[in-house]
Image: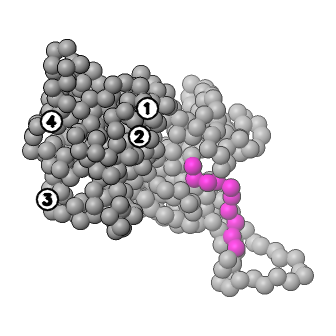
Amino acid sequence: MDSLANKRLLLGITGGVAAYKAAELARLLVKSGIEVQVVMTQAACRFITPATLQALSGKPVFTDLWDDRIDNGMAHIDFTRDNDAALIAPASADFISKLVHGSADDLLSTLCLARACPLLVAPAMNRQMWENPATQRNIAQLKRDGVAVLGPASGAQACGETGIGRMLEAEALVQEVESFFQPKLLQGRRVLVTAGPTFEAIDAVRGITNLSSGKMGYAVARAALEAGAEVTLVSGPSCLAPPPAARLIRATSAQEMLNAVNDVVEGMDIFIGVAAVADYYVLNPSEQKIKKDAHILTLELAPNPDIVANVVNLPNPPFCVGFAAESENLYEFAELKRRRKNLPLLAANLVQHALGADEGELILFDDEGAHPLPRAAKIVLARQLIQHIAKLYRAHQPSAEA
């Protein structure tokens, strides 16, 4: 994760059974290239030892406001001055209350009060504690104070109950930290993304579709959120979990996707058509399952609407970005498609290198030519695409032309 390389993070651990997850969290953060300084409350030390976190972070762990290893006696000042952010994981109900009310009775609460860096908290508690009105008031106040609240998740809890209150898993928290550090190139912009395949019914159980998994479109939605945008994701059939902060609209057929796009496109600043929309639909699908027999089955197909072209041709269209998946002559066919649809930007790839995979390659086509993006994880490609979109979007604004 290049975006985390050379970053410095203070990892605060408070008392709760979820403290065991902090060990894996520290390991993954260090693996990603981030420098981790761990600070623990005395209650946290009841659940996991400082020795474990020291071994995983590679740095001394601090638990005491009066620790004499700090020459000037001001660990609560020095730690946040030297870090890019502070993450409290787990953040107990008690510690969240301390943050809201400005309590400072130990090292971790004191350095949070004196911090000079952004603060992120990952709540972890029993579901009744989470749902208690006092906790909900405290969480709302933290958000108003500019603190990023990560989670919690829902599921089985140590108390034997099931519900919301679980701390996010370590991998999810690393993703959240990585997202937090992304440049906010689209802050305040509204972005509409289509993703996944469409499904055109043949009968009650069969249909025409394609191999798109939705991974690229979902990655683009996540990257746009990371860049500060308000994102609406119109998704065809996909088993992927959408980015939690995105507004999700599900569609099945191309016509349903077009209707969903038309319903929300007004007021959007940017439209990114990543979905692999079926080119044809069946004119007369059967309401019942077609029984197999020895005869040749003939289907009559008609062309589907072109969603990207429809958006481009609106009276006041957003900045439009298209996608093209080709099996040959990529440069020629992609540029022809871009010019035919009058798109300022088109991202293209070869289907044999991309569909369903976790990694891929993209070539971005705009008025300046072709810009190849080398093979990488799709979230990395999506971030590079968003950076390119942000640059072109700014250049296309009337104020930029004046």
The disc label shown at residue 106, or none: 4
- For the residues labelled 4 and 2, the Cα–Cα distance comes to 22 Å
Residue interval drawn in magenta: 206-215
Drawn side of residue 331 relative to residue 394, left or right: right
Q: Earlier in the sequence, mark 4 or mark 2?
A: 2
Question: Mark 3 and mark 4 in contact (Cβ < 8 Å)?
Answer: no
Which image quadrant for residue 83?
A: top left
- For the residue pair 307 and 376, the one nearer the viewer reads as 376
Question: Mark 3 and mark 1 in contact (Cβ < 8 Å)?
Answer: no
User: Residue tagged by mark 2?
Assistant: 23
Image location (x, y in percent) of residue 131: 22, 63
User: Residue tagged by mark 3?
Assistant: 134
Image location (x, y in percent) of residue 263: 41, 62
| Coloration mode | one colour
Q: Earlier in the sequence, mark 4 or mark 3?
A: 4
User: Residue tagged by mark 1?
Assistant: 56
Q: Secondary structure at mark 3?
A: helix
- For the residues labelled 2 and 3, the Cα–Cα distance comes to 29 Å
Drawn side of residue 55 relative to residue 279, left or right: left
Please name the residue shown 86% across and 83% down the image. Answer: 293
